[in-house]
Amino acid sequence: MSEDEFTPRELGLLAGVDWAALARRELVTQVAEGGLCPQEVMQAHVSAGMRDRLAEYDDAEAAEDAYWKGFVHGVRAFVVQNLARAAKNN
């Protein structure tokens, strides 16, 4: 991995924010509150290209784990952003 590449956790964080902006509210809530991604979210979200990218790491299992932890944090960041935005508008 070069210095200008994102880590698996950072990739997950970015993906989580993007996914939460487009996903159904109940799924976003489930991920944000539960701290885990349901299997159907994991299967539907990760492209074959991302799986290949994570598989290139020396410890591919750890890279995928870091990706999903980052993803959950990205979803939570999206929720917090929206709560703050709603509070500001009230």
Image (cartoon, rainbow, N blue to C red):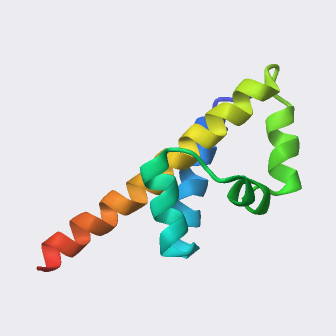
Given residues 23 and 35, the one toward you in this image is 35
Figure quadrant of the C terminus = bottom left
User: 22 above or below 32?
Assistant: below
Where does the image place residue 73, in percent across and percent down from the top left? Answer: 47, 45
Where does the image place residue 62, in percent across and percent down from the top left? Answer: 71, 25
Residue 9 in view (yes/no)? yes
Horizontal side of 47 relative to 77 (left or right) equals right
Figure quadrant of the N terminus = top right
What's the residue at 63%, 42% (across, down)?
68
Where does the image place residue 76, in percent across and percent down from the top left? Answer: 42, 53
What's the residue at 65%, 40% (across, down)?
67
The image quarter containing residue 16 is bottom right
What's the residue at 84%, 45% (across, down)?
51
Given residues 8 and 71, the one toward you in this image is 71
Where does the image place residue 74, in percent across and percent down from the top left? Answer: 49, 51
Residue 6 in view (yes/no)? no
What's the residue at 45%, 62% (across, down)?
29
Given residues 30 and 51, the one toward you in this image is 30
Residue furthest to the top: 58
Horizontal side of 60 relative to 79 (left or right) equals right
The image quarter containing residue 56 is top right
Q: How many marks?
A: 0
User: 33 above or below 18?
Assistant: above
Residue furthest to the bottom: 90
